[in-house]
Image: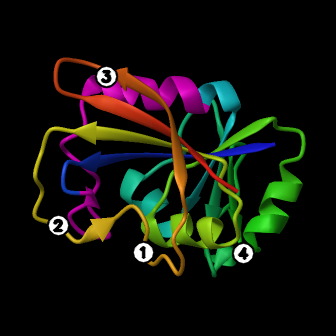
Amino acid sequence: MILNLIMVSSINGIISKTEIEKPYWNTKEDLKFFSTLTKKSGVVIMGRKTFETIGKALPERLNIVMTKNPQKYKNLKNLKFINDSPENILKSLKNYSEVFLIGGSTINSLFLEKNLIDYIYLTIEPWLINGKITLFKDIKKDIPLILEEIKKLNDSTIVLKYKIKK
């Protein structure tokens, strides 16, 4: 199984102004790119704060929400609340060939430090944002990446696809 991280960022590396505010600077082209890739895989993994920021399950995908209090939420057909390790979550998704991790920064760091992420898709939007939430909350070691692709979504927005060197 391939685990991809997919995120949108400002030029200065901000993915959100605060922990409860979704980006307002991403373009319709980025939203379409995100939707196409994640629907193709069929499953997304996110943290509770990301889920609450989105406010609903993303359609046509299994939504896995990592939370310390899954009993607080109701599991629905395409929405599962789980308190488990990244490794066990991925094992439970063995029928999927590709999975997308969609944030936030704490969850991204949790999967990164366990060396579980294979690729990073990072959309760069042409904004400088006064915010504090970055792609990863904490990185404990240096991790080399290999640039595999640069895709232009419109005149000002690009997607960088990196492979994590393992």
Q: Position of residue 37 (x, y in %)?
A: 56, 28
Q: Which residue has dot 4 on it?
A: 83
Distance, label 2 to label 4, CA atoms, is 29 Å
Distance, label 2 to label 1, CA atoms, is 13 Å
Residue neighbourhood size for the residue with mark 1, other residues' Cα within 10 Å, grouped as few (<14), some (14–19), many (≥20): some
Q: Which residue has dot 1 on it?
A: 137
Distance, label 1 to label 4, CA atoms, is 19 Å
Q: Residue at x 63, y 80 (%)?
A: 69
Q: Examine the rendered structure and indicate whether residue 72 appears above or below residue 50.
A: below
Q: Quick one: label 2 or label 4, which is nearer the N terminus?
A: 4
Q: Examine the rendered structure and indicate whether residue 152 appears above or below residue 111.
A: above
Q: Quick one: label 3 or label 2, which is nearer the N terminus?
A: 3
* Number of numbered tags placed on the structure image: 4
Distance, label 1 to label 3, CA atoms, is 26 Å
Distance, label 4 to label 3, CA atoms, is 33 Å
Q: Which residue has dot 3 on it?
A: 29
Q: Position of residue 93 (x, y in %)?
A: 83, 49
Q: Are marks 2 and 4 in contact (CB under 8 Å)?
A: no
The amino acid pointed to by label 1 is: Lys
The amino acid pointed to by label 3 is: Glu
The amino acid pointed to by label 2 is: Gly
Please provide the residue range marked out in magenta: 13-38
Q: Quick check: can you spot residue 73?
A: no
Question: Which element carries disc 2, helix, strand or loop?
Answer: loop
Q: Which residue has dot 2 on it?
A: 131
104 part of magenta stretch: no
Q: Are marks 3 and 2 in contact (CB under 8 Å)?
A: no
Mark 4 or 3: the one toward you:
3
Label drawn at residue 72: none
Question: Which element carries disc 3, helix, strand or loop?
Answer: helix
Q: Are marks 4 and 3 in contact (CB under 8 Å)?
A: no
Mark 1 or 3: the one toward you:
1
